[in-house]
Image (cartoon, rainbow, N blue to C red):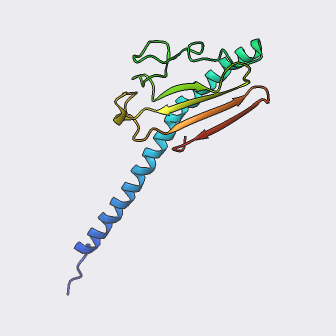
Amino acid sequence: MASKRGFTLLELMIVIIIIGVLATLGVMQYQAAIEKSRGAEARQILGQLRSQCAGIYMAEGETEHCTAANLRINTAASCIADMIPGGQCCDTHFFRYAISGTGDGETDAIFTATRCISTDGTGGKSPSGSTAHTLTLTTDYAAGTDIWTSTGGY
């Protein structure tokens, strides 16, 4: 009797299912890693804003003049070249930015980056995120502390 060599249909189906599951898991991990890397844009710009505000704090002793206008954050409804998007997402950035917590006599500032999403109609650099996750830097210049918080793994 001659021996038969090869795989049965059942064995081939099991291998195909295993490859499909592994490919799905790989794609999901890849997408998560790519989204996390987009957070580098936000960390860089928030760091620049923090440094600019530190200069204002060192000159004046408070953060009252750490405003969106002084830090070149565009709060208008349209994109302006050479300005950081704040009021809406622009096709040059994955995030839009804001500053708060500054005022007369204040020594701290809160810088926030919010991920542009495709469903809010504000555009942003393609591809847009699916959820408007945030990355926040809270700086107390008097105490010399920085606190980073985030949603979405940035």
Q: Position of residue 43 (x, y in %)?
A: 58, 31
Eyeballing the image, is 62 above or below 22? above
Q: Position of residue 10 (x, y in %)?
A: 25, 74
Q: Residue furthest bottom?
A: 1
Report the side of 71 relative to 129 (left or right). right
Residue in the image at 31% along x and 65% along y: 17
Residue in the image at 54% along x and 25% along y: 98
Is 67 or 44 nearer to us in this picture?
A: 67
Q: Position of residue 83 (x, y in %)?
A: 50, 15
Is 4 or 119 nearer to us in this picture?
A: 119
- The tally of labels here is 0
Specify the quadrant that holds the C terminus.
top right
The answer to which quarter of the image holds residue 141 is: top right
Eyeballing the image, is 150 above or below 72? below
Q: Position of residue 114 (x, y in %)?
A: 50, 33
Report the side of 36 relative to 144 (left or right). left
Report the side of 87 relative to 123 (left or right). right
Residue in the image at 49% along x and 22% along y: 86
Specify the quadrant that holds the N terminus.
bottom left
Q: Residue furthest right?
A: 143
Q: Residue furthest front?
A: 104
Report the side of 96 relative to 14 (left or right). right
Eyeballing the image, is 18 above or below 100? below
